[in-house]
Image (cartoon, rainbow, N blue to C red):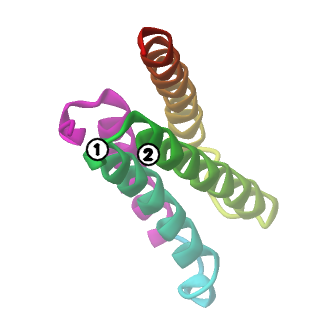
Amino acid sequence: MRDHRDLDVWNRAMDLVVEVYKITNDFPRSETFGLSAQMRRAAISVASNIAEGAARRTTKDFVHFVHVARGSLVELQTQITIATRLGMQVESADVVTMATQVGQQLNGLLRALRRKLSDNKQQA
């Protein structure tokens, strides 16, 4: 079991959650239960799945949860694009850059975990 709080990608994902909450606070009231809530859930899901994967017993399980986190991140990026197209102020925030960085880190973590799985298979 790994401590997720030691993972840079988890810390960045947590920063992303905070940023998403900040920008969605300025969304129209009509979006409280729509796009705003959806974006918050997706951002929370990224950090939560990294944490859950790190707590799992096997590297294979960790890989699965990192994939789920990456799916939630792509969902969030799509929602950011929707909000931008609807004229909501998200592009001025750092959220786009932050989401891209988290995505790069998730991809790097997946590569490292896959190498570990491959190394373990070769040793067996």
Residue behind mark 2: 61
Residue kind at label 1, given as amino acid type: Arg
Contact? badges 2 and 1 (CB < 8 Å): yes
Magenta span dominant secondary structure? helix
Give the x, y percent position of residue 49.
42, 53
Answer left or right for 35 relative to 50. right
Q: Is residue 34 magenta?
A: no
Residue at image x 50%, y 34%?
102
Quadrant of the image containing the N terminus: top left
Answer left or right for 6 relative to 25. left
Residue projecting furthest to the front: 124
Residue at image x 48%, y 67%?
40
Nearer to us in this view, 49 or 11: 49
Residue stretch in magenta: 1-25
In the rendered view, tell whether residue 38 sits above or below residue 76.
below
Q: CA distance from mark 2 to mark 1?
A: 7 Å
Residue projecting furthest to the right: 85
Residue behind mark 1: 57
In the rendered view, tell whether residue 105 sits above or below residue 69.
above
Q: Quadrant of residue 21?
A: bottom left
Nearer to us in this view, 113 or 123: 123
Kindly identify which numbered label has been placed on residue 90: none
Q: Secondary structure at mark 1?
A: loop
